[in-house]
Structures are given as structure tokens and as C-alpha cells.
Image: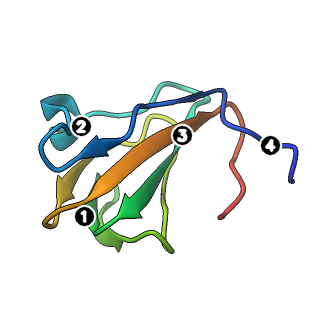
């Protein structure tokens, strides 16, 4: 599993630079997994199908399945990025 690497990553965003598109409903493409990695602070990840919410921290990344609708909400000062994979990513 150590050889599974993201094919693309977003820039690092903070609570002020996080794009509106990530704060609103969106989803990954078919056969694309996203792994939301919090570098500092906390971020709420809201899944819309099935509905649920989790709080992400530097020790707890959030997995986005292919075509899964979701959005994120900063919970105070934070830094985060999203790594994109063409197969299920490693858990950590």
C-alpha cells in the first residue's frame, strides 16, 4: 500500500483562502477518491449522500468516495489540502 500516491493535490488552503467551490456542494469524478488532509486546526466535512458529518483534524483525514457529494466548513483557523487518487488511498 505504500506505493499508492496521489496523482494531484490542491494547494494548501486556510480559512480565508478556502475556495467557495469547496464550501458548497460538489463531488469527485468517477473513479477519483479524495483525501482531505487537515494540517492545522479543524474542518467539518459534510457528506450529503448518505448524510453525515465528521470533524477532521491533523490525525483524522476525511475520505471522499468517487462521485460522493460533500462540502467542507472551517471550524476556526485551519490549514488543509486535498489529495486525489485513482484508486482507494491508504488510510493515513
**Residue 35 in the image, given as x and y percentages of width and height:** 52, 49
The quadrant holding residue 67 is top left
Q: Which mark identifies residue 83?
A: 3
* First of labels 3, 1 by sequence position: 1
- Relative vertical location of residue 91 with respect to residue 80 in this rendering, above or below: below
Q: Earlier in the sequence, mark 2 or mark 3?
A: 2
Secondary structure found at label 4: loop
Q: Quadrant of the C terminus?
A: bottom right
Mark number for residue 4?
A: 4
> Would residue 27 be found to the left or right of residue 67 on screen?
left
Determine the CA span between mark 2 and mark 3. 14 Å
Looking at the rendered image, the quarter that the N terminus falls into is: bottom right
| Disc 3 residue crowd, few under 14, some 14–19, many 20+, Cα 10 Å | some
- As drawn, the label of residue 22 is 2
Query: In percent of the image, x 57 and y 31: which residue is there?
Result: 32
For the residues labelled 2 and 4, the Cα–Cα distance comes to 25 Å
State which tag comes first along the sequence, 2 or 1.
2
- x, y percentage for residue 38? 40, 59
Element type at mark 2: helix
Relative to residue 81, is residue 11 depicted above or below?
above
Q: Residues within 10 Å of mark 4 (few under 14, many from 20)?
A: few
Q: Which residue is mark 1?
A: 44
Nearer to me, 24 or 8 = 8
Q: Earlier in the sequence, mark 1 or mark 4?
A: 4
The reply to whether dot 1 and dot 4 touch (C-beta < 8 Å) is no
Are the residues flagged by discs 2 and 3 in contact, CB closer than 8 Å?
no
Q: Residue at x 25, y 64 (%)?
A: 44
Amino acid at each position: 500500500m505504500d506505493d499508492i500516491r496521489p496523482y494531484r493535490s490542491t494547494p494548501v488552503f486556510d480559512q480565508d483562502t478556502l475556495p467557495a467551490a469547496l464550501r458548497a456542494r460538489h463531488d469527485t469524478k468517477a473513479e477519483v477518491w479524495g483525501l482531505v488532509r487537515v494540517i492545522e486546526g479543524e474542518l467539518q466535512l459534510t457528506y450529503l449522500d448518505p448524510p453525515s458529518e465528521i470533524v477532521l483534524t491533523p490525525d483524522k483525514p476525511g475520505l471522499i468516495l468517487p462521485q460522493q457529494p460533500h462540502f467542507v466548513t472551517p471550524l476556526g483557523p485551519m490549514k488543509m489540502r486535498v489529495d486525489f487518487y485513482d484508486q482507494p488511498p491508504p488510510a493515513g
